[in-house]
Amino acid sequence: MKIILFGHQNWGIKAIQTINQTNHDLVHVYTHPLDMDKNEKVWYDSLTQVCKKLGIAVTEQNFVNDSDVEKIKQMNPDLIISAGWRRLIPSSISTIPKYGSINMHEGFLPSYRGFAPVNWAIINGEKEIAITIHYIDATADTGNIILQKKIPIQLEETAKNVYDKALTLAPELLLKTLENIQSNKAKNINQKTLEKGFFCSRRYPKDGKIFWDNTRTSIYNLIRALSDPYPNAFCFFKSQKIFIKNAKLIQDDYRGPPGRICSIIDDGMIVTCGMDHTKNQAILITQIEINDKIYKPKDFFKKLWEDLE
């Protein structure tokens, strides 16, 4: 099949590498500039550079629209694949290929449509996510499902851990999908026949603010959902913005007002969370970042006391 890829981030790179190992012809790649989103840390490689090394034609742009229709028609693709592409592909383009257009989504559809599905799933305390490959229709992540693979989320895992697990499974699922589409054996499950789904909004760095009157579990989930390379969860101490890079739920039982620093030990800083004083409220903060410097909490507070003296 002749394939056009709309890709970005590591999902796009993984799709290129997978297609390049097959007999399919990747005729063109559309990707976003690395600096497209000013609110996002760039922690992934450039698809443009990957394509240049492999001799694949590539175009960088933020959007595709009706002005790109004729160019894509001239390429005569059999299939369009979206992998990490951040914008809607209009139906004037998605309906061009013989086999239509498909999207790789790291979310459990019909739930977790839209932005940052892995991060949102961890924030919500989910025990699993899924990679879903589905046909593209007029709205985001609502097309008929072709294939779906569940991935467990362990309590100690961060968003990056889960993201990497999903990325590892992606080639196998994409290859199976390509094989089934070409042989006309691809499933075509209408999402309307499943439970009612929902859309996740885009996340911004400011959304990482910790509210200590929330439960310790919800605060822990926020911290691990926003661990590196994502913009970290944060709080303030004496007007000093502190990014929380890592934390643990501990068995040691501490209770008190929300946000109270109860103890500073070698392993970190114990803070009480939530309003329910009838049970353990403790979370252990093990690593923080202040003014682009990473500290163990005890080292930061030792320096703070020395500065005050």
Image (tube, helix red, strand yellow):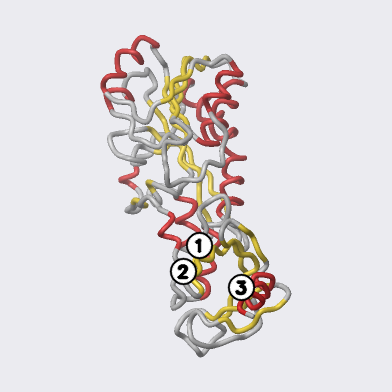
For the residue labelled by badge 2, is the local secondary structure a helix, a strand or a loop?
Answer: loop
Residue appearing at x 54%, y 86% in the figure: 279
Instruction: Give how far apart the Cα atoms at labels 1 and 3 are.
Output: 16 Å
The answer to whether mark 1 and mark 2 are in CB contact below 8 A is yes
Q: Quadrant of residue 305?
A: bottom right
Tell me where residue 68 appears, x and y as whole percent: 31, 19
What is the quadrant of the C terminus in the image?
A: bottom right
Residue 262 in the image: above or below residue 7: below
Please name the residue that numbered disc 1 is placed on: 233
Tell me where residue 194 appears, x and y as whole percent: 35, 49
Mark 1 or mark 3, whichever is nearer to me: 1
Residue appearing at x 48%, y 14% in the figure: 27
Instruction: Give how far apart the Cα atoms at labels 2 and 3 are.
Output: 16 Å
Farthest residue in the top direction?
A: 74
Q: Is 181 or 220 nearer to us in this picture? A: 220
Tell me where residue 277 appears, x and y as whole percent: 50, 89
Question: How would you rate the neighbour count of disc 3 (Cα within 10 Å): few for under 14, some for 14-19, many for 20 or more?
Answer: some
Q: Residue 249 carries which label?
A: 3
- Mark 1 and mark 2 lie on one chain; the one further toward the N terminus is 2
Tell me where residue 216 appears, x and y as whole percent: 52, 75
The answer to whether mark 2 and mark 3 are in CB contact below 8 A is no
Instruction: Give how far apart the Cα atoms at labels 1 and 2 are.
Output: 6 Å
Residue 142 in the image: above or below residue 303: above
Amino acid at circle 2? Ile
The answer to whether mark 1 and mark 3 are in CB contact below 8 A is no
Please name the residue that numbered disc 2 is placed on: 210
Residue appearing at x 44%, y 78% in the figure: 213
Residue 105 in the image: above or below residue 298: above
